[in-house]
Amino acid sequence: MSVERTTAEAVHNALSNGITIGIAGEASLTRHAPFTLFPSPVPRASFQQAWDLATCFGTLVHRVASDPLWLIQALSSASESDAFTNGLLDILRQTTDPSDGSPLFSPWSLGLHRSDYMLHLNNGPENFDDVKLTQVEINTIASSFPMLSNKMSKFHQHTISWLNENAVAPTANSWNQDKQKNWEENRLPPNDTPQGYAETIALAHSTFLSSHGPSFEGRRVVAIFLVQEKERNFVDQRALEYEAKSVGVTMIRRSLSELALSLSVDPASGSLLYSEGPTSGIIDAVVSVVYFRAAYTPADFPSATEWATRTLIEKSTAIKCPTIAYHLAGTKKVQQLLADPATLSRFVGDLPEVMEKLQNCFTGLYEIDKSSEVFRRALENPHNFVMKPQREGGGNLIFGDKVKEALLSFSDSTLSAYILMDRIHPRPFKTWLVSNATPHLVESVSELGIYIGFLGDHKQNVLLNKPLGFLLRTKPESEADG
C-alpha cells in the first residue's frame, strides 16, 4: 500500500476522531496533530519497567511533597535568582506549619503525573539493542495529552488493521510490509488513560465530599479546570472535561485571571467558593478539586492578580492537582538532588526495592559548581550535557555549544537556577512522520511517558497509587528540544 494512500486514510481517521490541536490565533479552528503513520517500537521489557516504576514515583513525589521544610531548603539557592520559583516557595511557606511542616488548609494531595523516559544507547549506535530506560523528567503539573494518547493508540490499531486488510505487494513507496504486515492489533498495549484520569479526579471529588459534605447545606459542588489563555490544546482538555462529567464531576474551565473575579474562600469553613453572578445560575458553588493545566510558567502570572488567585486556591480546603508542594517536588533541582543516594534514601530508604528501581532509571544529574570535575567536563564536551532550568512546558533547555557559552557567560546566581544533566542518546529509527497531511520519512527518536494517579494525605494514608496509561511521542532525531 502506498504511503500517500495510507496517509490520506490516516489523516481522515485523525480528524474524525479528534486527534487535533488548535490553530494559533483561531479560537475554535483545529488541524490534525502531527503523528507517526505507524507505531514506534519500544522493547516490551523497557515498557514494563517504565510501567512498574509508576507506583515508585507516585510514592517518591508524595513523600518529598510531604516534607515542605526540606523543599524550602532544597530550593532556596535556585529561588534567589529565579523569581518564579521564589513566588511558588512563598506560597508554600504561607500554607505550611513552620513547626512541623504539616499543611495548614487541606491534608489531601492529588497527583496526575507523567514520568518521561528515553532508551539510552549504552555503547553507541553500533550496539542497537544495548539500551537503558532512562528518566528524562517527571511532570507533576499539567501533564498533557492524556486523552490524545488513548486516541493515538486506537488510531494505530486502526492503521494496522486497515493495512492488513488492504495489503499488496511492496513498492518503492510502500511501508516495509515484510517486517510489519503481520503486526496484530493486540501487540499494542491497552491504553485507558482517559478513564483513569476521570476516575482519579472523581475519587478526589468523592473524598472531598465525604470529608466536608455535611457543611455544604445543599450548595452545588464543582471542580475547577484551570487553563491558559488562548489554549491551543483545548481538544484534549475538553475531552477530559466531558469524561469527568460522565463519572459525576462537573468541571468549570477557567483561566487564572477569570478566576480572580469569581473565587473566594468562606472564612468560617475554608471552602473555596465559585460564583458567576446572579444571572448565571452558579452562586457560591463549593469547589472540591482544582485541576491545573496552567500556572507552570511565568507567562501565566502577568500580574499580582494571578499570584493572589493561585495563593487563594492553595489557602482553601479544595483538593489541588497539584498542591504547591507537588509542583515544587517536580522541579529540576529536586530531580537532581534525588539522584544522590543519600537524599533518595531520606524518602524511600525504608523501601529498598523501590529505591533500587528508581536508581536504575536515573542518569547523571549535577549541581553546577565551577570547581567541580563535572563543570570541567561540560566545558570540554558540551554536547554530552544538557542544562535545565526550573521550568515546565518545553523550549527551556540548553544544548550543544550553547551549554559552554552559558557556563562561561552566566553569573553564579543565574547558574544556581540550573542543573546539568548527562545528555541521553536515544536509540534512533526511521519512521514516517505526518504533519499538515504530508508524510516525511525521517530518522526519529521516541520518548515514553507513563501517567500516574495518586491520592493521599500528609500522614501517608494512600487511597490511590497506580499507572493510568502511557504516551509515546516521536520526533525527528535532529530536534533537540520539544
Image (spheres, helix red, strand yellow):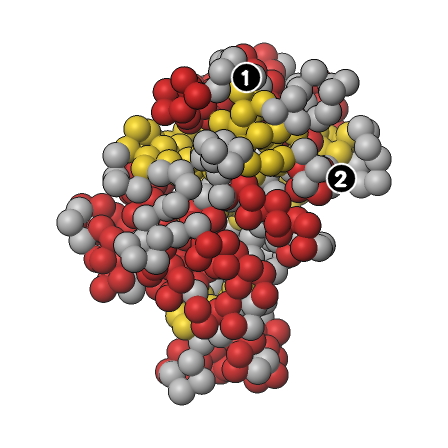
Badge 2 density bin: few <14, some 14–19, many ≥20, Cα 10 Å: some
173 on left or right of 269: right
Q: Position of residue 257 (x, y in %)?
A: 71, 42
Which secondary structure lies at badge 1? loop
Please say if 275 is above or below 326.
above
Residue that badge 2 annotates: 230
Name the amino acid type tagged 1.
Answer: Arg
Judged from this view, the residue extending furthest toward the right is: 25
Residue at x 71% of width, y 37% of height? 261
Q: Position of residue 49 (x, y in %)?
A: 31, 40
Please say if 95 is above or below 187.
below
Residue 470 visible in image: no
Q: Quadrant of the N terminus?
A: top right
Name the one closer to the observer, 417 or 308.
308
Residue 76 visible in image: yes
Q: Residue 219, labelled with which disc?
A: 1
Residue at x 61% of width, y 24% of height? 284
Please say if 66 is above or below 181.
below
41 on left or right of 262: left
Name the amino acid type tagged 2.
Answer: Lys
